[in-house]
Amino acid sequence: MSAAKRGAWILTIGDELLRGEIVDSNKSFLSERLLQLDLESTRHVSVGDDPAEITEVLRQAVAKARVVLISGGLGPTIDDITTAVVAHTFDRPLVRDPEQVERIRSFFAALGREMSANNAKQADFPEGADVLPNPVGTAPGFGIEVDNSWIFCMPGVPRELYRMMDEQVLPRLQRLFSTDQVVRSTLLRTFGLGESALDRELADLSDASAGISIGFRTQFPDNLVRVVSRAPDEAGALRELERVVDEINSRLGSIVLGRGERRLETIVTELLIAGKHTVAVAESCTGGLIASLLTDTPGSSACLLHGVVAYSNDTKIRELGVSPADLEAHGAVSEPVALQMAAGVRERAGAELGIATTGIAGPGGGSEEKPVGTVYVALASPGGNSVRRYQLFTERSRNKQLAAQIGLDWLRRQVLGLELPDETFPRLRDTRQAR
């Protein structure tokens, strides 16, 4: 392999990317996965559905990179041109794979549909290609070697790309680029400190001499910590990885939500189900977001009994038993109202736990006493009721997301027996500063 070649180029294809019609999350996913093999992503490029532009970038990538990962343009329509352009660029005739044609036909048959003729083009591959099966879609991927570089083409649909990268591409890359060093990594999801604060807490744990590196990225409202361990053998890499993870857990404590890709809503729902806990939700400013997030996890009907979006005062009175006098005296965004919402929904649903949110999401409706971003979260439980006031942002969508996340985090802490954060909980200040 040419000594000048290093790392990987990631190429995403589609006019919709350049027009800003969709957010291109595939690049970050692929870069993160490459890190597991200690392969550095050295260039990200997005290209429209233009054969000449794609060809130009392909030639540059093969000249510079050890690995070229491509997503998009493998579909059946006229603008899905990736396979044809790759074949033409590197003088490889297209060959139709009968086995893949039948697999695509069976995919449609399982849905009770007939495969249209244009879908057959998805079974065309450059001669000599290594076909990558797609268990959740119609477009297989493929890999080819060109001038001592490997090109892997995958679908642009994220769920199809993710499966193909993890199940097909990563094992191939591991075999192709095995070295005398074993790389192991893990991801810790945190909710409580921004990237800058996390860096201050953990920077001293990075140690090149010990093969340890730590990286951070934001996935609002969470922050993720990636720990990478390198050693001559797997046992050593895993030993050092676990040592550092234990130290991070010791330093950060309860703000570590879990390990891996699972988001807080999944973690909470699984905890509730495992512990046979039940919950009811009363939401004002979050507009049903907490209930929606809980129900994203299969089996959530075992723990979520009831949800009320009590946006109006009348609904708070009628559905949750909130006192009209307290609404008049304190307003809908207040401690007594939040407490009554949580207690009311718990009692009416017959649930073990009741969680409630009320606040001023913005951009209007704030006052000097209660500016935009004022949010009350309340929890009703057999051991008593709790409420806190938080001052969030001035941006409506972020206020809703963060208030819902706080509510979910309260449920996590309640189930695990962790202390609930008070009004001065530093994570909100740190998150705001880091962003």
Image (cartoon, rainbow, N blue to C red):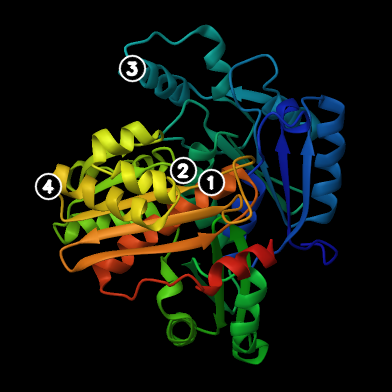
- Asked if labels 3 and 4 touch by Cβ distance under 8 angstroms, the answer is no
> For mark 3, what is the residue?
111
Point out which mark residue 35 bears.
Answer: none
- Asked if labels 1 and 2 touch by Cβ distance under 8 angstroms, the answer is yes
Vertical placement of residue 253 versus 342, above or below: below
> For mark 2, what is the residue?
285
Mark 4 neighbour density, 10 Å: few (under 14) some (14–19) many (20 or more) = some
Residue 68: x, y in percent? 71, 49
State which tag comes first along the sequence, 2 or 1.
Answer: 2
> For mark 4, what is the residue?
350
State which tag comes first along the sequence, 3 or 2.
Answer: 3
Which residue is depicted at the point 32% across and 33% down?
A: 315
Vertical placement of residue 326 versus 243, above or below: above
Query: In the image, what residue type sits under mark 2?
Result: Cys
Q: Residue 282's quadrant in the figure?
A: top left
Query: In the image, what residue type sits under mark 4?
Result: Gly
State which tag comes first along the sequence, 2 or 4.
Answer: 2
> For mark 1, what is the residue?
360
Which marked residue is nearer to the observer: mark 1 or mark 4? 1
Which residue is depicted at the point 82% across and 25% down?
A: 50
Which marked residue is nearer to the observer: mark 3 or mark 2? 2
Choose between 2 and 106: the one closer to the eye. Answer: 106
Vertical placement of residue 9 versus 206, above or below: above
Choose between 129 and 169: the one closer to the eye. Answer: 169
Which marked residue is nearer to the observer: mark 1 or mark 3? 1
* 325 relative position to 383: left or right: right
Choose between 115 and 35: the one closer to the eye. Answer: 35
Residue 174: x, y in percent? 55, 62
C-alpha distance separating marks 1 and 3 = 46 Å
* 319 relative position to 209: left or right: left
**From where the camera sits, is residue 155 visible?**
yes
C-alpha distance separating marks 2 and 4 = 23 Å
